[in-house]
Amino acid sequence: MIKNILIYIAVLAISFSFAVFYYAWFSNFLLIVVVCLPVLSLICSLPFMIYSAVKGFSLYAPKVMNTDSLPYLKLVAKSKYGFFCPLLKIRLYTNNHFSGKSKKINFKYSGLAGKPVNIELAQLGKNCGLIECKTKWLKVYDMLGIFFIPVKFRYNTETLIVPKAEFIKDDIFSDKQAIIGYKKKSGGGFSDDYEIREYRNGDSMKNVHWKLSAKNDNLMVKEPSLPIYKNFKIMLILTDNAESNNIVMAKFAGVCMNVQKNEIPCAVSTTKAVGAYPLSSQTNIYSLYRAIYTQSNLGNADVQDAEPYSIFAGPEEVAKGKKTCFLL
């Protein structure tokens, strides 16, 4: 590294000046040690440098993380026995496709490479998004960081950073939606809503409404039902402010949990992308997040006659750093 070379040159110049102006055995000895130091470092480090370069390393990233933790990568030595690495340097090119943050990160490591080494991407912060990380080369240095062996190290990793869901009441849609009917709850089980009908062969005795059966002198059963909701179009009001978008996504995550739990038909749109993504109990939520983060075409979900439902963050909440937003 250039910094190490400049430091060595400075130390060598000081040692030489000291030997010239203060002629003595220890000044000459110091000069000889400083002159020989890079050679000694290379001789001692070269076997480990070659072994590190030949065995190589791998780079891994978790597929999904949440905003509670800083994003990170794992550097793993390919040798199962591990080895000593004098000094390793990797240049990482990172980009969050949602927040727009791009950083060039230089990572250094020295020591035993027997266990995976975490590379924290603190520069990107705890923001929602799709983090892409690319590398091209790594360099294995001697102990002084002057000589190095370049190693081709091409990796491209992606990590999906999902928000921590804000608590949303189950009846969040009660003031805006209209229940247009009921349908049988798949799998049965407990439900707050149910229909009363006459007993049929195969019905579980657990569902028999005994009081009503005694009153009507005929077996009546409670059939668990779910309400059929009006279709909604959820609009995410996204801006160029990462904190504001984090707030919106945290609220949206809570809405998603509510929507999928109650099987409310919805479509999702954003101010940063075209189209609408269908959201139901069968939707892969990670695929939905990826589509939002990459600001690609969200799809062709039917939003005709859908009731709009917008999620956005107020400026005062963003300024205070609160994870709250207003819902309209």
Image: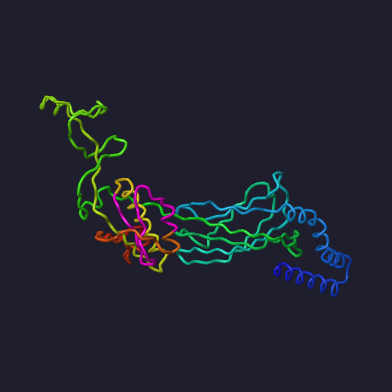
Note whether 190 is above or below 7 in the view shown.
above
Residue 18 in magenta stretch: no
Tell me where residue 261 sits by quadrant: top left
Q: Is 210 on the left-hand or right-hand side of 86?
A: left
Q: Is residue 170 left or right of residue 220?
A: right
Q: Quadrant of the C terminus?
A: bottom left
Residue beneath the point at 44% across and 54% down:
287
Q: Nearer the viewer, residue 274 or 126?
A: 274
Q: Which residue is at a point 21% across and 33% down the rendered structure image?
A: 222
In the rendered image, which quarter is residue 299 located in? bottom left
Which part of the image, by quadrant, shows the N terminus?
A: bottom right
85 lies left or right of 67: right
User: Which of these two is toward me, 11 or 208?
Assistant: 208
Spot occupied by residue 70 in the image (x, y as percentages of width and height): 50, 55
On the image, the x and y values in percent for residue 310 come to 29, 61
Q: Residue at x 60, y 62 (%)?
A: 92
- Color style of the picture: rainbow
Residue 269: in magenta span? yes
Residue 118 place in picture, x, y as percent: 59, 52
How many marks on residues?
0
Residue that extends furthest to the front in the rendered view of this protein = 201
Measuring from the top left, give residue 286's x and y in whole percent.
Answer: 44, 53
Q: Left or right: 1 with respect to 123?
A: right
- The span shown in magenta is 264-290
